[in-house]
Amino acid sequence: MNTAPALAISDITGADVPAIIALWQRCGLTRPWNDPAADIALARRGDSSTVLVGRSGGAIAASAMVGHDGHRGWVYYVSVDPEHRGRDHGRAIMAAAEDWLRARGIAKLMLMVRGDNIKVQEFYQALDYAVQDSVVFSKWLDGRPPTPGMK
């Protein structure tokens, strides 16, 4: 039986930013070529994206960056604090992201998972997400070389 406190979910505030970045770092989500503070600032800039913060007993336990292009929704930086895992907080933050998109008339949610991250792939499959056969291309528009590990 799960007796963990329910996850209270809200939009990120300015005061939350350092703790969310620290959470993403603990979860191994940050990369040298992505500035998480800049990513959060961009998500907070308009009405088409946000960062959802899940609190359990007042402590930040989970987060997800969510946004849309008017047609498809995307989630990034889905995270659950290692000390709060096993309490369905991952399911709760994903349900909140889905609800956020539905409230804006978005019918489809997309996400990307690194090919070697089997545990996370299994998590999304358990939430009824299906693998889509696509190839992701990227290019730095500021002239940087390709991201390490990219072909």
Image (cartoon, grey):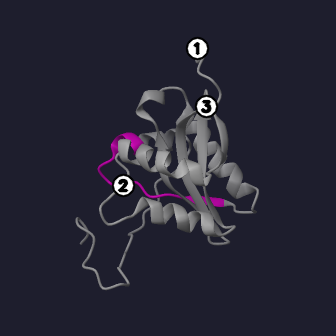
Q: Residue at x 43, y 59 (%)?
A: 36
Instruction: Check disc 2 and report its element: helix, strand or loop.
Output: loop
Instruction: Check disc 3 and report its element: helix, strand or loop.
Output: loop
Instruction: Check disc 1 and report its element: helix, strand or loop.
Output: loop
- Amino acid type, callout 3: Gly
CA separation in Å, label 3 and label 1: 21 Å
Label 1 crowd (10 A; few <14 / some 14-19 / many >=20): few
Name the residue furthest top: 1
Mark 2 or mark 3, which is nearer the start of the sequence? 2
- Amino acid type, callout 1: Met
Q: Quadrant of the C terminus?
A: bottom left
Label 3 crowd (10 A; few <14 / some 14-19 / many >=20): few
Residue 115 on the magenta span: yes
CA separation in Å, label 3 and label 2: 24 Å
Q: Which residues are magenta?
A: 108-120
Residue identified by numbered label 1:
1
Mark 2 or mark 1, which is nearer the start of the sequence? 1
Q: What number is the disc on residue 58?
A: 3
Mark 1 or mark 3, which is nearer the start of the sequence? 1
Q: Are marks 3 and 2 in contact (CB under 8 Å)?
A: no
Q: Quadrant of the N terminus?
A: top right
**In the image shown, does 28 or 121 lie closer to the viewer?**
28
Label 2 crowd (10 A; few <14 / some 14-19 / many >=20): some
CA separation in Å, label 1 and label 2: 33 Å
Q: What number is the disc on residue 30?
A: 2
Q: Position of residue 89 (x, y in %)?
A: 56, 34
- Amino acid type, callout 2: Thr
Q: Residue at x 65, y 28 (%)?
A: 6
Q: Is residue 48 above or below residue 100?
A: below
Relative to 41, is 149 on the left or the right?
left
**In the image shown, does 15 or 38 lie closer to the viewer?**
15
